Image: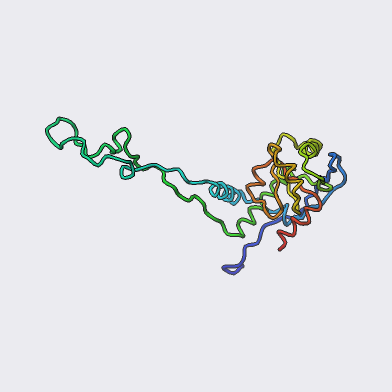
């Protein structure tokens, strides 16, 4: 029996996922083994849902605003006397019942953001990577494309050779490369992230995850800390 309060371990299988490694021209070069502690853990769907909701909520501005009858300019004078007119009683032309009046229970600026414990976010990220591996949507490259200057056409050629063009793709790279980033930012559906900066929503919102063997080493270091 486990003691109360003991750390909950991440469930994982003994199978080692094996994927193909592609050259920048789209040819299969070799087979590559992925770390099962990262790419083959048990998929926690409830945790994935919670993580996606969190990231979407944190992106909301929450600046929608309406005015109550107290905020609308004017309306200080009583429109007509209380009795004797035959009309309904009215105290202000800014009543919510009047055109141009205040809004009842309308939205006001608020903060929608919330957070999750670090361990839960880490497990959600591992679950998302494992789900992509299981669906054969992880593409490993022999090496990262190198650009002497920003060249969008060359990056498009790489995606076309890998049959990843026209889809939503997440490209991960280990070291900061301005030319790679600038060559990718105008390509529709392509998201480029450093290994330390991507999250569960980035993984699940894209069809394929692309990274090189060199980036893989940097990626594993992030989760082995």
Q: Residue at x 59, y 52 (%)?
A: 47
Looking at the image, residue 63 sits to the left or right of residue 6; the answer is left
Q: x and y percent of residue 213 in the render?
A: 81, 51
For the rendered model, the colour scheme is rainbow
Q: x and y percent of residue 18 in the render?
A: 80, 49
Q: Is residue 146 above or below residue 35?
A: above
User: Which of the 4 quarters of the picture holds residue 120?
Assistant: bottom right
Q: Is residue 164 above or below residue 3?
A: above
Q: x and y percent of residue 96 in the render?
A: 30, 38
**Front in this rendered view, residue 44 or 80:** 80
Q: Residue at x 13, y 35 (%)?
A: 83
Q: Residue at x 71, y 46 (%)?
A: 192
Give the quarter of the figure containing the C terminus: bottom right
Specify the farthest residue to the right: 29
Give the quarter of the figure containing the N terminus: bottom right
Looking at the image, residue 223 sits to the left or right of residue 109; the answer is right
Q: x and y percent of residue 51 in the render?
A: 59, 50
Specify the farthest residue to the left: 84
Count how many numbered circles sit on residues in the image: 0
Q: Residue at x 70, y 56 (%)?
A: 12
Looking at the image, residue 166 sits to the left or right of residue 124; the answer is right
Q: Is residue 183 above or below residue 197?
A: above
Q: Is residue 111 above or below residue 24?
A: below
Specify the farthest residue to the bottom: 3
């Amino acid at each position: 029996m486990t003691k109360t309060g003991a750390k909950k371990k991440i469930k994982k299988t003994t199978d080692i996922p094996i994927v193909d490694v592609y050259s920048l021209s789209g040819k299969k070069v070799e087979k590559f083994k992925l770390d099962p502690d990262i790419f083959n853990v048990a998929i926690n769907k409830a945790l994935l849902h919670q993580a996606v909701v969190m990231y979407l909520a944190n992106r909301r501005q929450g600046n929608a605003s309406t005015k109550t009858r107290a905020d609308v300019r004017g309306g200080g004078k009583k429109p007509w006397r209380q009795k004797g007119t035959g009309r309904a009683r009215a105290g202000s032309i800014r009543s919510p019942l009047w055109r141009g009046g205040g809004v009842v229970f309308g939205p006001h600026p608020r903060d929608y953001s919330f957070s999750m414990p670090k361990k839960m976010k880490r497990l959600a990220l591992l679950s998302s990577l494992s789900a992509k591996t299981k669906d054969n949507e992880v593409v490993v490259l022999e090496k990262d494309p190198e650009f002497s200057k920003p060249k969008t056409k060359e990056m498009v050629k790489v995606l076309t050779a890998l049959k990843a063009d026209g889809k939503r793709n997440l490209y991960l790279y280990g070291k900061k490369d301005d030319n790679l980033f600038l060559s990718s930012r105008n390509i529709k559906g392509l998201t480029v992230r450093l290994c330390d900066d991507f999250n569960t929503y980035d993984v699940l919102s894209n069809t394929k995850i692309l990274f090189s063997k060199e980036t893989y080493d940097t990626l594993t270091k992030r989760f082995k800390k």
